[in-house]
Image: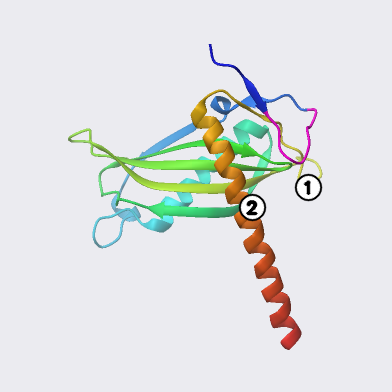
Amino acid sequence: MTKKVTARTHHGANSLPGKPVSASRSEMSEVVLPAQTNALGKLLGGHVMHLVDIAAAMAACRHSNSYVVTASVDSIDFRNAVNLGEIVILKSQVNRVFTTSMEIGVEVFSENVLTGERKHTTSAFVTFVSIDEKTRQPKPVRPLILKTAEEKRRFAEAAVRREARLELRARNQKSDAEIKSKK
């Protein structure tokens, strides 16, 4: 029997009941049509990014039971192209919860409809902020319940990505301030 572990963030516990990662898991798919492809018959990267944002938002909404907004895209790695006529499949889940934000992992696959072959085409990490439906301000997000070693690994890795993101943001703000002071 797997032991349940309630993961709390370093920002302190909140009083909302936790939810397992499985409650946020989302999947969507669609056929790649000509209007979504480039001159080589490959799904446009911008369209993949659009689909990633939607799939990630679905997972964030499911976990938080609230409206969410995209705050950051830490990375999006294109590994293989998705071809015209193939099915594009997106799978998303919450990796970690912070105070008002959540990191969502998204994996994208292509499926050849003639052979059934699937390829991992894209991976992305997207951060969403939970928004209160009345005040339209950020609101606390319920804790994440981790059940598997894979969920615990993703949880730990998300903290590392968050630290890097916050460091980069601080450096960029410092650079912006320096540029403004020189004008």
Residue 56 in picture, x, y percent from top left:
53, 42
Which range of residues does the magenta coloring cover?
Answer: 7-15
| Closer to the camera in the image, 164 or 53 | 164
Task: State left or right for residue 154 relative to residue 14.
Answer: left
Q: Which residue lies furthest to the left in this view?
A: 115
What secondary structure characterizes most of the magenta part?
loop
Residue at 27% in and 42% down: 86
Residue position for label 2: 163
Residue at 65% in and 69% down: 172
Give above or below for 166 relative to 9.
below
Residue position for label 1: 137
- Tell me the element at label 1: loop
Q: Distance between the residues labelled 1 and 2?
A: 23 Å
Residue 47 in picture, x, y percent from top left:
41, 53
Residue neighbourhood size for the residue with mark 2, other residues' Cα within 10 Å, grouped as few (<14), some (14–19), many (≥20): few
Answer whether residue 13 is magenta in the image: yes
- Tell me the element at label 2: helix
Which numbered disc, 1 or 2, marks the residue that appears first in the sequence? 1
Q: Can you see residue 107?
A: yes
Residue 53 in picture, x, y percent from top left:
52, 48
Task: State left or right for residue 161 relative to residue 177.
Answer: left
Residue at 47% in and 51% down: 50
Question: Identity of the amino acid at label 1?
Answer: Gln
